Structures are given as C-alpha cells and as structure tokens.
C-alpha cells in the first residue's frame, strides 16, 4: 500500500495517505470524492479492497443487497483491515445478512425503541449531574474520561441491558482486552472472552426466570414466528452492545468536548443556546469532530467491509464479484458535493447526512441511544461548567480497536 506523508497542492490521486493537518486532509478528501467514487487499495490484512470516497456511491452500496458479509462470517475471507480483525466481532450482529440480520435487528429495536430512549433521557440527565456533582466535590479539575465520559454510557447500558451495577468494572476490563490489537497473549484474550460469554449465559438464564424491563429480558423471552431466540443468537447481540457501546460513546463525548474547547467561536454559539443547539452540534461532532480537535488526520480507514455477490457498477466503476468494498467515513463526510465548506466545524450545520454511524440496513443499531447520551453529556457539562478549559495533553490508546481517548484533562 503506497502512502505519503505530504500531499502536493492540488494533487487528488494520492490515496490512502498518512495523517496530515486536518484542513489539508479535508481538502484532499473533497478533491478525491469529486474525482472518483472509489479507490482500489491493498490492505495489510485481507488483501485488496475498494474504499468508497464519494457520499452518493456510499449510499448506493449500502442499500444494495448484492453486497454481503457472509464470507467473513464463515471465515472464507479475511476481513480487509490495517490489523487482524478481532475474531469475536465477526460472530456478532453486524456480520449477519438478511434474513437473520433482519430478524435479530427487529427484536433489538423493540428494546431500543424511541420510547425507551426517551424514557432513559431523564435518568441519563440525572446521572450526568450526579457525576458532575462528584467531580465538583473533588476540586476544580479532572480527567474527564475517567470521571465522566466513560462512567455515563456504562451506567446507561447497565440500565438498558440489565447488567448489575457492581459488574461495570468487569465490562470495562473485558472491552479493553477483547479489542486488543495483538499486544496481549492469545490465552489472555480467550480467557476474557470466555468470562464475558459465561457471564452473559448466566444473565440470560436469570432473565428467563425473572424477566425485567431491560434488553436482555426482551431478547431472552422474545419469540419470532413461534420460535424463541437461542442463547447463541442473544450472546453476540449483547456482547457487541456491552463491550462496544460504552467505549465508542465515551469516545464521542470526549471528542465533542475536545472539539468545542479547540474552537471557542463554536463553543460560544453552543453556550448561547445549549438546548437549542446541542442536536446539530452533536451531528457535526460525529461528522467532523476529530478534525476539529486539530488532530492530524489521514485517509483509507473504513467501516466494516462487504463482498460483492456479482459484478456491480457504481457511478461508472465496477466492483467485481468476490471483491471487498468498504466506506471511508472521513472521505464521504467531507464530500463537497454534499457538505458545504466540509472543512469547517459548524455546530449549527442543518443539512448534515454524515455516515459516521453507517447507513441503510447496517445503520448503527444503537445510534438513537448514543446520540441521546452524547447530547446529554455535553449539554449538562457545559451548563454546569461554561468556563471549562483544557489543561493538558489529550491522549489515546492506539493498541485497541476503538482507539479510546484515555486522558482529557480539564479544569473549571
């Protein structure tokens, strides 16, 4: 895979590329999307794949049933990626195809309905303020990740899924181990996977005996055409939500706070009307948040890939039968044909059809929940501490799949 560290001005063919300053990266991604809908690249693992750069091409691919994930699920094909893809994730809902995917997704959506998310919003707001109270009691500074951004989503998931509050620390540990990118011994990863699986089997059995108002109870007692869901169908759903849900949401919260603190003009707009601006601000954070922090950005990374079941023409380029294809979200989210001034961080942006949470059949199952959590977290934080400021270096853990933000030092 050819990469470059510097991009010649006006040169639109160099893709993928290593991290450069955000403005240069955004402009380059816009030029590539204008030039072509997709680019053929060679991945370190899993061979060659098409990376979709253009927003309209991404929509076409993600709504076309001729693209499937079964060859990855059956291990016939290795997932094209920059590192070995965690094996347990391949057995989760996101690698299912219809009709199984449709059935499981429908059952999950009953438990993560708009009504359920709305009901959780008040509880989430209360817990956010509890965490802020605790931070304030300790002084006027904190690592916002440990004391707020991680604690809030794991509390919400505990409520939603029915996980015992005293077990939250276990899930934080399991997530770190299961998303490891090869730095831990294989035996340790397997041990933690088995611990997570055994925990879920016990919880499913408990909820069958004594159902509650939570997702595990809904799945454990769900029926589809007179057939109950098997434990082996429930476990992958629960695991992807538990070990991925809180970690990714915590990253969104941390990125949003960092982006706003790095752009005082946009923070001022938010502070002038927090409740009226928070929804559009969160959508812009999802689209452009990492760019807005000043963090160097690259191109070529992507969402989970698909395999073409036959030759498919997308905007004049053919993806042949058996070839892999994925969406580069940084590319499609900076397509100037869709986003006016894509390099600009604008918390009031109204037309914002970003694809950070995918699109179509594989649109993120937990998107409504994640949006609500990030909105509440950022809104309540800046209502409480309107003069919040960054006091040190922001750090990330690049040894796990989610590239978790680990340090966000702030004071108020």
Image (spheres, rainbow, N blue to C red):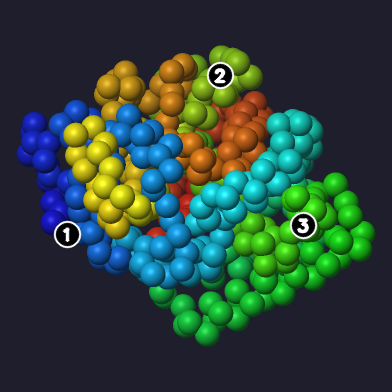
Q: Nearer the viewer, residue 254 or 56?
A: 56
Q: Which residue is mark 1?
A: 1
Q: Which of the 4 image quadrants contains residue 293?
A: top left
Q: Is residue 140 visible?
A: no
Q: Which residue is mark 2?
A: 277
Residue 250 position within the rendered picture, expressed as x and y whole percent measured from the top left: 57, 47
Q: Earlier in the sequence, mark 1 or mark 2?
A: 1
- Which mark lies nearer to you, 3 or 1? 3
Q: CA distance from mark 2 to mark 3?
A: 45 Å
Whether tag 2 and tag 3 are in contact, CB under 8 A, the answer is no
In the displayed structure image, the side of residue 60 where residue 248 appears, left or right: right
Q: CA distance from mark 3 to mark 1?
A: 48 Å
In the displayed structure image, the side of residue 164 where residue 396 appears, left or right: left
In the displayed structure image, the side of residue 263 where residue 154 appears, left or right: right
Binning the other alpha carbons within 10 Å of mark 1 as few (below 14), some (14 to 19) or many (20 upward) gives few
Q: Secondary structure at mark 2?
A: helix
Q: Nearer the viewer, residue 293 or 228?
A: 228
Q: Secondary structure at mark 3?
A: strand
**Tally of numbered discs:** 3
Binning the other alpha carbons within 10 Å of mark 3 as few (below 14), some (14 to 19) or many (20 upward) gives few
Q: Which residue is mark 3?
A: 227
Residue 241 position within the rendered picture, expressed as x and y whole percent measured from the top left: 63, 54
């Amino acid at each position: 895979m050819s990469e470059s560290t510097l991009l010649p001005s006006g040169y639109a063919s160099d893709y993928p590329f290593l991290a450069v300053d955000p403005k240069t990266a955004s402009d380059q991604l816009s030029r590539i999307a204008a030039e072509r809908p997709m680019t053929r690249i060679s991945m370190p693992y899993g061979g060659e794949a098409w990376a979709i750069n253009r927003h309209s091409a991404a929509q076409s691919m993600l709504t076309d049933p001729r693209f499937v994930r079964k060859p990855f699920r059956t291990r016939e094909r290795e997932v094209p990626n920059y590192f070995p893809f965690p094996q347990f994730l391949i057995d989760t809902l996101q690698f299912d195809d219809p009709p199984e995917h449709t059935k499981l997704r429908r059952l999950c959506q009953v438990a993560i309905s708009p009504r359920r998310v709305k009901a959780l919003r008040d509880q989430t707001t209360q817990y956010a303020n509890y965490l802020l109270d605790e931070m304030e009691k300790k002084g006027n500074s904190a690592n916002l990740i440990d004391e707020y951004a991680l604690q809030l989503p794991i509390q919400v998931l505990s409520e939603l899924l029915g996980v015992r509050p005293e077990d939250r620390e276990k899930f934080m540990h399991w997530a770190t181990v299961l998303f490891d990118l090869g730095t831990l011994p294989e035996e340790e990863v397997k041990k933690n996977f088995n611990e997570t699986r055994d925990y879920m089997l016990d919880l499913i059995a408990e909820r069958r005996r004594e159902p509650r108002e939570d997702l595990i109870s809904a799945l454990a007692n769900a029926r589809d055409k007179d057939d109950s869901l098997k434990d082996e169908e429930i476990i992958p759903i629960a695991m992807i939500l538990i070990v991925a849900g809180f970690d990714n949401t915590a990253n969104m919260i941390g990125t949003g706070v960092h982006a706003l603190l790095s752009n005082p003009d946009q923070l001022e707009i938010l502070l002038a009307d927090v409740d009226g601006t928070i929804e559009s601000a969160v959508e812009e954070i999802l689209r452009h948040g990492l760019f807005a922090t000043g963090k160097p950005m690259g191109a070529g990374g992507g969402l989970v890939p698909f395999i073409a079941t036959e030759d498919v023409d997308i905007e004049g380029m053919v993806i042949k039968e058996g070839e892999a294809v994925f969406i580069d979200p940084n590319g499609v989210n900076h397509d100037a044909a869709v986003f006016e001034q894509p390099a600009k961080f604008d918390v009031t942006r109204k037309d914002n059809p970003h694809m950070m949470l995918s699109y179509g059949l594989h649109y993120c199952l937990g998107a409504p929940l994640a949006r609500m959590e990030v909105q509440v977290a950022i809104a309540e934080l800046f209502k409480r501490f309107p003069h919040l400021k960054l006091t040190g270096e922001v750090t990330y853990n690049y040894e796990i799949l989610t590239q978790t933000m680990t340090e966000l030092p702030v004071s108020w």
